[in-house]
Image (cartoon, rainbow, N blue to C red):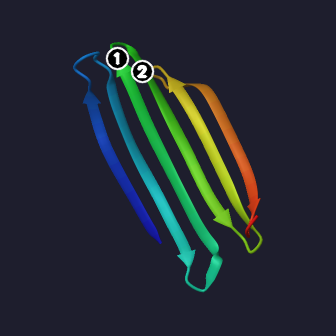
Amino acid sequence: MLDSFDDYGKAIDPYHGLEVGSHVSMHYAIHPDDPASAVFASDWQFTFARDDWQVTIETENKMTCDAENFHLLRRVTAREGAEGAEVLVKEWQETIPRGFL
């Protein structure tokens, strides 16, 4: 198992004043005796702000598998304002058969 986290901090563009920030966490796991136990997950958060306007975009991604398929889950959440009111949530799930097409 491996877990990582990177905080890229925040920076302000001097030309237009937009503040941009991001951080990511990732998780990788697999049991050495069971290739079908593989898991990958990542969570990203991006922030954008200027003056009294601000938004946050969060992405969640997860891939698991079994002997026959890969299972994918993706989710995007957009928030606006200091309170973080949700303005968009979108989720996709997909199963892809293993093997060559």
x%, y% of residue 47?
Answer: 41, 31
The answer to whether 6 appears left or right of 80 in the picture is left
The amino acid at mark 2 is Gln
Query: Secondary structure beneath disc 2?
Result: strand
Nearer-the-camera pick, 13 or 81: 13
Q: On the rendered structure, is 5 left or right of 12? A: right
**Residue 16 point in image, percent of width and height:** 29, 15
Which residue sits at x=51%, y=53%? 42
Q: Which image quarter: residue 85?
A: top right
Numbered circle sitting on residue 83: none
User: Which residue does the image show at 38% across and 54% down from the upper left?
Assistant: 5
Above or below 24: residue 50: above
Q: How many marks?
A: 2
Q: Which mark is residue 54?
A: 2
Q: What residue is drawn where x is 70% and y is 59%?
A: 71
Local secondary structure at mark 1 = strand
Give the Cα distance between marks 1 and 2: 7 Å
| Front-lying residue, 35 or 45 | 35
Q: Mark 2 and mark 1 in contact (Cβ < 8 Å)?
A: yes
> Residue 100 location in percent, x, y?
73, 68
Q: Residues within 10 Å of mark 2 (few under 14, many from 20)?
A: some
Disc 1 marks a residue whose amino acid type is: Arg
Which residue does the image show at 60% across and 71% down from the upper left? 38
The 10 Å Cα crowd at callout 1, few under 14, some 14 to 19, many 20 or more, is few
Q: Residue furthest left?
A: 14
Q: Residue 19 sits in which quadrant?
A: top left
Please, which residue is most extreme toward the top here? 52
Q: Which residue is mark 1?
A: 50
